[in-house]
Amino acid sequence: MTKKNKVLNSHVLAALTPGAKVDIKTRNINVSSDPEDATLVLNVGGELFETYKSTLNKHGGTNLSDAHFLEQFYRESRKDYFFDRDPVCFRSILEYVRTGQLHLPSNVCGPAVKRELDFWGVNEGLIQRCCWNIYDSWNSAYESLLQLDQDRKAMFCMDFEDKEDMDWSTRFRCKLWNILSNHDYSKLAKVYGFISLSFVVMSVFTFIVETHPAFKVPGTRDILGRSHQGFTIIPNTSHSMVQENQHSMIPHPVLIIIDIVCLIFFTLEFVLRLTCAPQRVRFFFSFLNMVDLVALLPDYIEIIVMNHVHNDSVSSIMHYITILRLIRILRTFRLIRHVSGLWVMMYTLKASLEELMLMSVFLLVGMVIFASLIFFVGEEQFDTIPISLWWALITMTTVGYGDMYPTKDLGYVVGTFCALAGLLMIGFTVPIIVNHFVLFYTHLQSAIRAEKRQKSDLKEKEEEQKLFETREESNKTKTNSKREKTNYDKTIEEHVDAPPSYARVLDTLQNGVDKNAAIDAKNADDHANLGSSLFQQNEKFGKEKTERSDNEFVHLLGNGTRKNEFCTSHV
């Protein structure tokens, strides 16, 4: 018996189904269905899929093999099963049911594929290894971006809740908080952001230039009372230390004044932020707030301590004051509030901690190996392994200060392999960190642009709503105007038909004009013209009255026909 027949006979299931074929490599059973077997039609997102009923039962772990699940989507009128799902993903799932191998399309996002797999009851662990990397990278990137949004909103977008039920003081706090924290909130917030950034730049500038001799003047104490008598920081050949100096120098008074102004501004900003914060405890212990607090403390401690220190006690505390001044470097972290790329860089380092640890392990292993080799080669400069570790670190990171270098043939060989190992280490690990940074930075910029578009759309909707309300009010005003005008015309007709005296008609018409002008200011000019016409009519009657006698005037008013023609023509 041949080896092939042994494999076929050893498979017990091969004898259970007539016509079944066994794949020798994969040990899978392939059964050809009868063309006359019953089929069913699956309409997935408008695309029709027809398959055998027996095919759906090959792998019982899916929802396609569940009759109760399929009955929920059966359409009696069309004799098919309709699913409003993605047909591209379903094609891969149906292929899995047929062949037992789950391959995914590369042009579909990982979270979308996961939703489809969950709907059809397919475990993601069945995905083949060739497609798993793409699927897992999609999901990992999606989860990383969600975490990025949550951390960004927690740090920069802390906001008030239940804005509709706030009193006037809480609304003021909310507005002030948005101005201090969100520089895109309004024009005033942008102006404040520019001012805050200017103070940060000035603070960093004074911290840097106050160490340069060109920005120093002779003296022992500055305008804040801080003592500098007899001591300055002098670089030594081995280390920097505080030594006595006969010519003490202090920073220029202008720099001290700028430093004081920045200190006052940052203190007021810190107090206002803490007062207006929606969640004070959470804000107080946030990373950026702790950086601001730690950056402020050294200045106050130095002012308080140095103002109460005698000259003979300066030497004992000067070393600690120097350390406090070193903490002022944290002022540069205030730029994170204004430059989003700095925060993304720090977040990338935090998110890439595993890759950084892996790079550190590679670097440590390479340092130990090549430091030991260069030591045992017998180079004169490498008299100890710790010194050789420094050389290996500088060589593997491609810095190469040139303070230590091999001089023998074997040393050249060790140095060559050390440099190559460093290049491989950087090539393996750094691109991963760079990809994380590019992913986070592009997503952050897209999120900021999306938020601006949402605010712009919301503002446009509010303007459209206001315009619609204005038009509605205008239409109501026009309707009321027409109604008042109709009533006014009826009043005129009633006065024309009746036989009152001329003065009574004139008073009624004038009162109607005044009433209509008070109701509708828009038609006041028309009503004024009508009153003017009636006033001219009054003057005309006055002239006729002086020219005619009283009997002729009474006779004119008594004639109803001529009166109606006269009043109708002038009204």
Image (cartoon, rainbow, N blue to C red):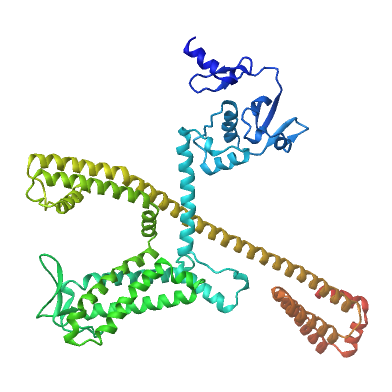
Tell me how many marks there are: 0
Which quadrant does the C terminus fall into?
bottom right
Q: Nearer the viewer, residue 89 or 544?
A: 89
* Foreground residue among 563 and 16: 16
Report whether 107 appears left or right of 205: right
Residue 371 on image: x %, y %:
17, 47
Q: Position of residue 46 (x, y in %)?
A: 66, 34
Residue 159 x/y as whole percent: 52, 67
**Snapshot quadrant of residue 92:** top right
Residue 449 placement, left or right of 507: left
Q: Position of residue 397 (x, y in %)?
A: 22, 49
Work out whether 549 lies above or below 559. below
Residue at 46 percent across and 47 percent down: it is 141
Can residue 188 be seen in the rendering of this structure?
Answer: no
Say whether residue 129 is left or right of residue 567.
Answer: left
In the image, taking residue 116 as reference, residue 491 lies left or right, namely: right
> Would residue 497 be seen by someone viewing this image from the given angle?
yes
Which residue is rendered at x = 79% and y = 73% of the image?
Answer: 484
Q: What residue appears at the point 73 percent right and 75 percent down from the top-left corner?
A: 520
Instruction: Single out the residue that lies furthest toward the top.
Output: 1
461 vs 213: above or below: above
Q: Judge by depth and name the residue closer to the eye, 271 or 472.
A: 271
Residue 497: image quadrant is bottom right
